Image (cartoon, rainbow, N blue to C red):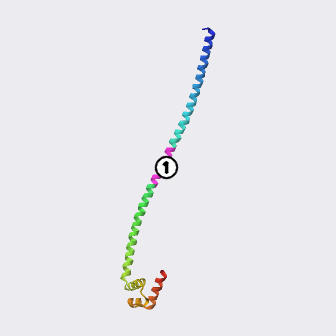
Amino acid sequence: MSEAVQFYLLLGLTIVSSTLSVVCLGLFVVARKNSETQRKHFIDHVKRTESFTQQLQILRSEIAEVRAGLLSMSKRIVNCEQISQELAQSVSAQKYDDPEAKIYSRAVKMIELGADLDEVMRECEIPQAEAELLMTLHFKQK
């Protein structure tokens, strides 16, 4: 092989080698840039995850407070219902203890069952005006 051919072969190899070096350097720069971008994205994701974790802890705390409040309110409601039932029983008992209330309760029952004015006056021993008033009130409600 002549020196000229060897020279051109060496020159070609040098050019190819240099080109490959430039391409590898370019790939290295691109890979490093992508790596930096990925690192930034990773850091952003970590920060967002920490933020979401904090928000989740706050929400769990608030839910616990709401539960405690609901339990307290439930106990109060049950207590109020018991008191209401006791009061209703007391009022009902007082209604039946009063002799005059018994008369009027009986008169109202008779009117509801269809008794006429004279029958209510006779059975309950109440004046005509009161019997008429009870009948008027009963029919007005219907």
For this rendering, which residue is in front, 112 or 41? 112
For this rendering, which residue is in front, 109 or 28? 109
| Residue 16: percent from left, percent from top | 60, 20
Instruction: Looking at this view, name the residue that lies furthest to the top.
Output: 2
| Residue 29: percent from left, percent from top | 58, 29
In the picture of the structure, the residue carrying the numbered disc 1 is: 55
Query: What residue lies at 38% left-to-right and 69% top-to-bottom?
Result: 82
Magenta run includes residue 52: yes
| Residue 24: percent from left, percent from top | 57, 25
Instruction: Looking at this view, name the residue that lies furthest to the front.
Output: 114
- Examine the image and state in which quarter residue 33 appears: top right
Query: What residue lies at 39% left-to-right and 75% top-to-bottom?
Result: 88
- Examine the image and state in which quarter residue 7 appears: top right
Is the residue 114 above or below the residue 59 in the image? below
Q: What secondary structure prevails in the magenta region?
A: helix
Secondary structure of the residue carrying tag 1 is: helix
Quadrant placement of the N terminus: top right
Q: Amino acid at mark 1?
A: Gln
Is the residue 106 above or below the residue 71 in the image? below
- Examine the image and state in which quarter residue 36 appears: top right
| Residue 109: percent from left, percent from top | 40, 83
Which span is picked out in magenta?
A: 48-62
Count of number-bearing discs: 1
Is the residue 76 above or below the residue 26 in the image? below
Circle 1 packing at 10 Å, graded few (<14), some (14-19), many (20+), is few
21 vs 56, left or right, is: right
Magenta run includes residue 79: no
1 vs 133, left or right, is: right
